[in-house]
Image (cartoon, rainbow, N blue to C red):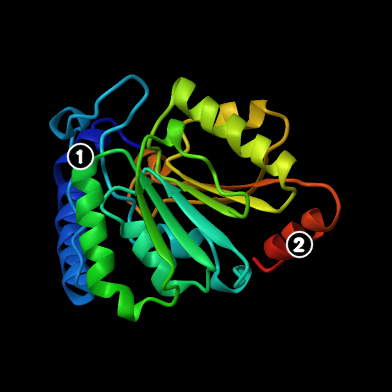
């Protein structure tokens, strides 16, 4: 980029992109009868703490670009940690044949908004079994049949490490294919350091500018499991 190019990008290209994107999001949400937009600081919500990240919904196309529909079966169970107002939960239940879709959110305020969104749209969802849980992820017992985990960078550091340890322990107790979809994967190295998580796909962010697109990229990981579960996981990734 030529000298001054970064300033030009921030002052011209980025504002135009944000304006157009926000207008499109408002249109999509109005059409679907839900409300999930906006950024909210955790201290405003009364749930701020170390290693917790402010609320900002994932872009609308993140899940569809990271997880092809043909790779999901009626036996798969989806969970979104830090589900906020329920944007990704809604998309998972609307667009995929999941057996069950779960959202876990710390903030009671965001949880109530998500519940309203799902209640208004439940009749149009492909997966009708949607469970929204208002809880700290550190207190939430992961169901043994969860096969897809979504993370929109909701926490970092010690909280992230604990959640990863619990995911791996869950696979050990109940062997099964496990896919982790991680938007804005700031803790990528921590996942790789476990020695048990395999990066199977990178999805570049749909934003202008290399650095901005990188911060909005998505990584898809698998947690290998021995025996038939491993073969099932291989079939999922071959479908991509």
**Percent x, y for residue 125?**
37, 76
Residue pointed to by mark 1: 10
Outermost residue toward the right?
A: 227
Q: Regarding mark 1 in the picture, which secondary structure is present there?
A: helix
Residue located 60% across and 74% down the image: 70
| Near-viewer residue (48 or 111) | 111
| Near-viewer residue (106 or 181) | 106
Distance Cα–Cα, label 2 vs label 1? 45 Å
Residue located 52% across and 74% down the image: 97
Task: Place residue 39 in its image quadrant.
Answer: top left
Q: Indicate whether 81 appears above or below 165.
A: below
Residue pointed to by mark 2: 232
Neighbor class of circle 1 (other Cα within 10 Å; few <14, some 14-19, many 20+) is few
Neighbor class of circle 2 (other Cα within 10 Å; few <14, some 14-19, many 20+) is some
Outermost residue toward the bottom?
A: 124
Residue located 31% across and 38% down the image: 106
Q: Regarding mark 2 in the picture, which secondary structure is present there?
A: helix
**Percent x, y for residue 172?**
73, 39
Residue located 36% across and 49% down the image: 133
Q: Indicate whether 87 appears above or below 158.
A: below
Q: Nearer the viewer, mark 2 or mark 1?
A: 2
Q: Indicate whether 117 appears above or below 4.
A: below
Task: Place residue 192 in its image quadrant.
Answer: top right
Pick whichever of labels 2 and 1 is earlier in the sequence. 1
């Amino acid at each position: 980029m030529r000298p001054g190019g970064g300033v030009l990008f921030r002052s011209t290209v980025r504002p135009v992109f944000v304006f157009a994107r926000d207008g499109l999001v408002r249109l999509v949400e109005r059409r679907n009868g839900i409300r999930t937009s906006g950024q909210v600081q955790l201290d405003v919500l009364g749930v701020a703490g170390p290693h917790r990240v402010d609320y900002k919904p994932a872009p609308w196309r993140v899940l569809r670009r990271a997880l092809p529909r043909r790779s999901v079966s009626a036996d798969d169970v989806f969970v979104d940690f830090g589900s906020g107002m329920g944007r990704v939960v809604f998309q998972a239940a609307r667009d995929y044949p999941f057996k069950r879709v779960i959202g876990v959110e710390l903030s009671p305020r965001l949880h109530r908004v998500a519940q309203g969104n799902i209640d208004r749209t439940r009749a149009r969802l492909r997966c009708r079994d949607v469970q929204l849980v208002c809880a700290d992820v550190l207190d939430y017992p992961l169901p043994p049949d969860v096969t897809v985990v979504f993370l929109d960078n909701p926490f970092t550091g010690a909280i992230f490490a604990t959640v990863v340890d619990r995911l791996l322990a869950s696979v050990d107790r109940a062997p099964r294919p496990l896919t982790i979809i991680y938007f804005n994967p700031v803790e990528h190295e921590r996942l790789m350091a476990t020695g048990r998580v395999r990066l199977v796909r990178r999805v570049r962010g749909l934003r202008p500018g290399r650095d901005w697109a990188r911060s909005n990229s998505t990584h898809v990981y698998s947690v290998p499991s021995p025996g038939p579960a491993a073969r099932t996981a291989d079939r999922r990734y071959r479908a991509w």
